[in-house]
Image (cartoon, rainbow, N blue to C red):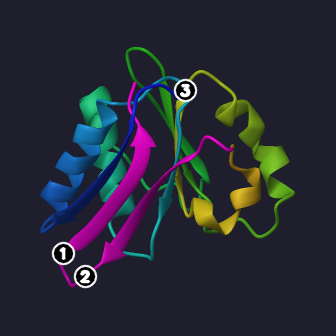
Amino acid sequence: MTGAAKTVKALTSSVEETRRLGAKLAKTVCQGDVFSLNGNIGSGKTEFVRGFVEALSSGVNVRSPTFSIVNTYPAPDFSIHHFDFYRIEDVREFSSIGLDEYINGDGVCLIEWGEMYPEVLPESVKRINFLEIDETTRAIETLFGFC
């Protein structure tokens, strides 16, 4: 990781603001980055990913990978791999989906519910924490270096 670490704390008041924050942070990624998106259902993780992906690859329809476990989206310089660990029942399932290949590849990984299986994440994982304040307000906090 290069550059100085910077804590980003934000309150968003709408889906659009959450997506804009995702887009803003997408501009800082490097190939090989792995992000763990942590928070309860409805805290804004998928909306954040929608903004993130749209910033790097416009016109892509981002779907939640709750049942597919991983969705991959093309971007000009690398692929974006969007995971959802929520339905994973056993750590052994990660070998069948090839998690190591994604994490150690040239793409960027965004992992919803990554906190459920921290043992499969690299030491360099960048955590983004989501907290639902009320029906529309979300608190989003990150701590990671910039390229």
Question: What span is in magenta?
Answer: 123-147
Residue extending furthest bottom? 134
Q: Residue at x 22, y 60 (%)?
A: 10
* Residue shown at 81% from the left, 56% from the top: 93
> Mark 3 — residue?
107
In the rendered structure, which amino acid carries the disc numbered 2? Answer: Ile
Q: Quadrant of residue 61?
A: top left
**Labels 3 & 1 near each other (Cβ < 8 A):** no
Separation (CA) of disc 2 from disc 3: 32 Å
Q: Which tag, 3 or 1, sits closer to the chain's start?
A: 3
Residue 57 percent across, percent down from the top left? 31, 27
**38 is higher (above) or lower (below) than 95:** below
Q: Are marks 2 and 3 in contact (CB under 8 Å)?
A: no
Relative to residue 84, is residue 131 drawn left or right? left
Q: Is residue 147 above or below residue 103?
A: above
Is the residue under label 2 in contact with that under label 1 (CB below 8 Å)? yes
Q: Amino acid at mark 1?
A: Thr
Is residue 146 covered in magenta?
yes
Q: Nearer the viewer, residue 68 or 78?
A: 78
Q: Is residue 57 visible?
A: no
